[in-house]
Amino acid sequence: TVDSIALAPDLSLAADTGGIDGITNVAEVNVLGLEPGASWQYEIDSNGVWLSGSGSSFNLTNGAHGYRVRQTDAAGNASNPSASQSFTLDTSPPVAVTVNPISADDILNAAEINSVPVISGSKEPGSFVTLTIGGLTHTFSPDNTATWSYTLTALDISAMGEGVQTLTATQTDVAGNTSLLSSHSFTVDTVIATPAMGLVNDTGTSNTDGVT
């Protein structure tokens, strides 16, 4: 058998947790295309230092880096290095989102409810926010802004009812890390009680006749 060629392997994240963007919170990266019995090495940031690998995977270094891989087959043929691929390992959860007061005093009266209140706060650019209010959960699409907002719907308002309410919110960053839970309390007060009158003392022969 004449064997004079070894093809360059390829790299693939074990889990691209933030979407198909090369940003992940799972360190493992798979080495594809290894020949049986081949040895292989990988390099970080084209620094000229080739690290010996074992099995068919290795762990990324934290942060954003470029990786190349090469193999030497059982016949002693050395492949060219693969093209550099960029991966980012981020295992740190983002900070908790902030939630702004829903009204000046965090008490929603009837007029404020009818004007359709907006809930807002700050977040990490690129992350998406998950909000739970009145037992209903809403997840917003990620964007590159540092703020988030949500306009209450009639369904939300109905689910909340009257009295003290507590909403919760988290954010999930581009690597798939989720923050600690933020909570914010406010009050819905849209009902005005009808006043009542009564005599301090209903004097006379009857204490229920309104004559005093």
Image (tube, rainbow, N blue to C red):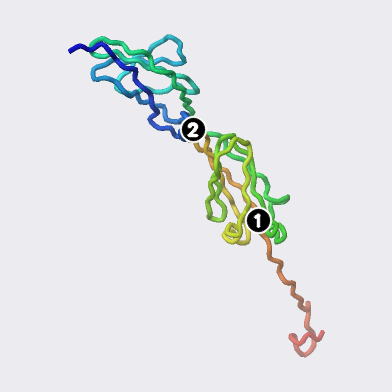
Residue 124 location in percent, x, y? 59, 35
User: Label 2 amino acid?
Assistant: Ala
Q: Quadrant of the N terminus?
A: top left
Above or below: residue 144 compared with residue 72: below
Q: CA distance from mark 2 to mark 1?
A: 35 Å
View extreme (bottom): residue = 205
Which residue does the numbered mark 1 point to in the structure image? 187
Among the two numbered marks 2 and 1 on one chain, the one whose residue lies closer to the N terminus:
2
Above or below: residue 117 compared with residue 146: below
Residue 60 placement: quadrant: top left
User: Label 1 amino acid?
Assistant: Thr
Residue 46 location in percent, x, y? 45, 13
Residue 125 location in percent, x, y? 59, 34
Residue at image location 23% in from the left, 17% down from the top: 37
Secondary structure category for the residue under label 1: strand
Classed neighbour count for the residue bearing mark 1: other residues with Cα under 10 Å, few (<14), some (14–19), many (≥20): some
Q: Nearer the viewer, mark 2 or mark 1?
A: 2
Q: Nearer the viewer, residue 71 or 17?
A: 71
Which residue does the numbered mark 2 point to in the structure image? 175
Residue at image location 29% in from the left, 15% down from the top: 6
Secondary structure category for the residue under label 2: loop
Horizontal side of 15 relative to 189 (left or right) equals: left
